[in-house]
Image (tube, rainbow, N blue to C red):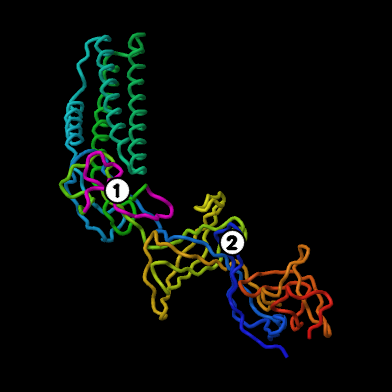
Amino acid sequence: MACVSRDQPRRRSRPLVLAAAGLFLISSTAASCGDEQTGVRLGEASRGTVAEIVEAPGSVTARAAATVSAPAAGTLDDLRVEPGRRVSKGQVLAVIDAPDLEARRRSAERALDQASGGGSAVADTSGFTAVRHRTDRQAAKSFAEARAAAAKITDPALRQVLLKQVTAAEEQYEAASSAAAEVMRSVQTGVASLGEAVDSLSTAQRLQAQQAYDLADAAVEALTLRAPVAGVVQFGGVSGGTTSSLTDLLSAGGAAPAAAGGGAGLPGVDTAVPEGAYVAAGTPIMTVVDVSRLGLTAEVDETDVLLVKPGVAATVELDAATGATYEAAVRSIDLLPTTSSRGGVSYKVRLDLAAGKNAQGGTAPTPRPGMSAVVRLQVREADDAVTVPASAIINVDGRDTVWTVRGDRYERVPVTLGVQGEDVVQVTGGLDAGQRIAVSGADQIQPGDRTS
């Protein structure tokens, strides 16, 4: 009579593959009795649940991270937050004092006051042309200065806004200057008066002065650094640049003017930029990390990635939280591959990470972005399936087979496999539950052998 045992996980290994397949079983299946003389053990195919697991290395990711940098050279005049503090989107973090930008705004303000008080005196057409050309040069200079100041801003969103503002102002002034020139041509043909041309030129002058002030004022306003996202503050930038996996959120800010990307600093000295320090344009001041929703990125081997679908459940273990287990679900799978550290091809799978339990059943520690993880994706499951131990399967001429018992002899039967767990596999064809089979030592059996 056959003995009975509980199913155990089985890991299906593949050559040159980072990910592996495994099994989590919740019911019992084939069992075996021992034959100590031959090493062949008999058991029965049974019914149970088989789950196939793809195992992959991964890391914890934050929802977003944004580094706030100095938009211009100056002094870190007002530092309003401390590391570890939670901030809301738009909250003021620090203020940079940049004398050059302040001086440019004051100069633009004086020019605006003069332009608002009345246009330049023009006695004839040659005077009109001279004033228009001078106004065009002033406009070109102010646009060039504004564009250069905007280009130094490292925050791409803010830089894009300011550059678009410069372009729009430039187009508006060109239209006004062209309109003044057109009126002057009408004067020369006797269609319009010189007074009308002067009024048109004055309009262009006032527009140029207003635009110069607005652009200078926007550059000064950018010196007030605000949180681009809600999250937790960390001084300095993200080492090596911002990455999707955020695997290294190290402080990279530096007080040296040339350290736009941060520096190593002196041993034992905090590399964060202190209040009152000089900063160059582009120096990272602080990074805001949004940890409101943590995720994972897993590197799944090409041999397994086609099994992974959005919504697939996973369990996660962290190197930093021994004994703790976290739940996760697949959010997306990249279409383009990456080359793994071992030279194989893998695909990045992104998951949403949920809370976990520790070994005692309590709440597991909250992970930090960048922590290493082992992700086990439950890619397939078969309920109420015919199952046999993996050790019962042998390959003959490229076909999966098992040795069944017919009477007192062994008979080789080809089978079709379905879900493949770590210790137990599903048989979808060629075998029925309850049939006696060789569950161990099958490679020792020869055709015609008797069971005893």
Helix, strand or loop at disc 2?
A: loop
Distance, label 1 to label 2, CA atoms, is: 37 Å
- Classed neighbour count for the residue bearing mark 1: other residues with Cα under 10 Å, few (<14), some (14–19), many (≥20): many
Mark nearer the viewer, 1 or 2: 2
Q: What's the magenta bit mostly, secondary-structure-wise?
A: loop
According to the picture, the residue beneath numbered tag 1 turns out to be 68
Q: How many numbered circles does the render carry?
A: 2
In the picture as drawn, the residue positioned furthest to the bottom comes out as 1
**Which of these two is toward me, 157 or 240?**
240
| Residue 335 at x, y percent in the picture | 57, 51
- Classed neighbour count for the residue bearing mark 2: other residues with Cα under 10 Å, few (<14), some (14–19), many (≥20): some
**Which of these two is toward me, 185 or 440?**
440
| Residue 289 at x, y percent in the picture | 34, 56
Residue pictured at 73% horizontal, 70% vertical: 394
Q: Is residue 355 above or below residue 179?
A: below
Q: Amino acid at mark 1?
A: Val
Residue 133, image quadrant: top left
Q: Amino acid at mark 2?
A: Val
| Residue 225 at x, y percent in the picture | 26, 48
Mark 1 and mark 2 residues within 8 Å of each other at the beta carbon? no
Q: Tell me, yes or no, whether the highlighted magenta stretch contains residue 415.
A: no
Q: Quarter of the image for the C terminus: give it.
A: bottom right
According to the picture, the residue beneath numbered tag 2 turns out to be 308
Which comes before the other along the chain, label 1 or label 2? 1
Q: Is residue 251 above or below residue 20?
A: above
Magenta segment boundaries in residue numbering: 241-267
**Which of these two is toward me, 409 or 48?**
409
Helix, strand or loop at disc 1?
A: strand
Q: Quarter of the image for the N terminus: give it.
A: bottom right
